[in-house]
Amino acid sequence: MTAPLGDVLRDYDADAPLEQAFTIPAPWYVDPRVYELEKKAVFGGWQVVGRLDQVREPGRFFTAEVAGEPLVIVRGRDGGLRAFFNVCRHHAAAVATEEQGQASSLRCPYHGWTYSLEGELRGTPDFDGVCGFDRGQNGLVPARLDTWESFVFVQLEPGPTLPEFLGRLPERIRPLGLDRLHFVERRRYEFDSNWKVFVDNYLDGGYHIPFLHKGLDSVLDYAGYTIENEDRFCLQSSPVVDSGRDAATAAVRKGDRALYYWLYPNFMINWYEGVMDTNLVLPLGVDRTLVLFDFYFTDVSSEAAMARNRASVDVGERIQGEDTGICASVQRGLGSRAYRAGRLSVRREAGEHLFHRLIAADLRRVYAGRRG
Ligand code: FES
Ligand SMILES: [Fe+2]
């Protein structure tokens, strides 16, 4: 018999200190009701949807999906950047259908209704004689948008402002000078697991690196790994060394320290000297996840630099391949009757502990609100 959702959500002690804490329980990773609740409770908050370089000039736009909601982000003629639900006010078709592009207006492909870049309804073919229809009330429905560094965020449910949400993250990131980095390429990786399995794997403080990522392990000082939690983000950091055990990885993972920033719930910024990638973790279903990797580099000036950059992306791809199998394996285990929850390493898994407490707070708040 399936337990009531309220019981499932109560089955986690968010007040337990790390030494006494368990992970969030297995049903939270496999129960479709939890997955549905997360759409509002977790993904209704600030979400990265794209990059500013995609929408620099008036008329540039890109589309995105957040928790099943289709969105279009467009730079208006007035220079303003706006987000709209990508849903035509006539019969709900997607108005913008390309992943990104340039347009002078947005025309729905279904019956040709046309919207300005600022979202106003302008053209409605063969629509004379319709009573009580006010064009002015039928523009594209806006969504809340803000930006930080080169990242475009959207928020679908009422909540804190973006600066409130980010807390001290901007001041921590500012010295890295992200504006010196150039976006080079996006890669997509799919995982047969719940999205939280990928985030847990990321937030285990390097625990799995010596076992699963031999190449990466050869350039990190595992013993010197540090973990710092803030309100809604975690910084994991490791000294970079060259052990001489893996020349391919050492060639593209340099500098003093590797910095791994995670922003609740699903965005990561991974920084090495001259190299950055971001990860955006997108649930496709309760046990299926898409992760978008955007790769950035400081030096894109020559063929030799670009060859180095490609080699760096290849190293990243190898590491993802090593994580793919383990995420699927964990998802299978979470569905087993033999597993309910696990303990956390005090030395390594403080980031995971923060993630689980934040998830629990959001799920319980929205669940309680629904029940009035
Ligand atoms: S649904 Fe867009 S014009 Fe009909
Ligand atoms: Fe990993």
Image (cartoon, grey):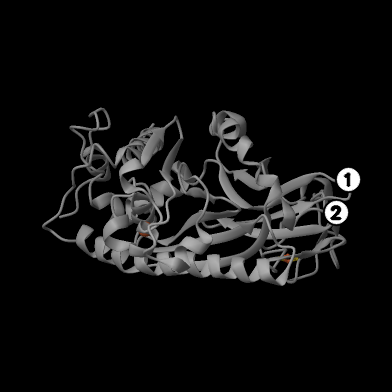
State the residue at coordinates (26%, 38%): 347
Which sits earlier in the primary sequence, circle 2 or circle 1? 2
The answer to whether 317 appears left or right of 148 in the picture is: left
Rendered view: 166 above or below 266: above
Quadrant of the image containing the N terminus: bottom left
The answer to whether 183 appears left or right of 75 in the picture is: left
Quadrant containing ligand 2 reads: bottom left
The answer to whether 63 appears left or right of 65 in the picture is: right
What's the residue type where badge 1 is placed?
Asp
Residue 354 drawn at (x, y percent):
35, 36
**Residue that carries the numbered disc 1 in the rendered image:** 78
Residue projecting furthest to the front: 244
**Residue that carries the numbered disc 2 in the rendered image:** 58
State the residue at coordinates (37%, 59%): 218
Residue 282 drawn at (x, y percent):
48, 57
Please say whether residue 316 is visible from this viewpoint. yes
Residue 239 drawn at (x, y percent):
42, 45
Please say whether residue 159 is visible from this viewpoint. no
Image quarter of residue 145:
top right
Front-most of residues 159 and 358: 358
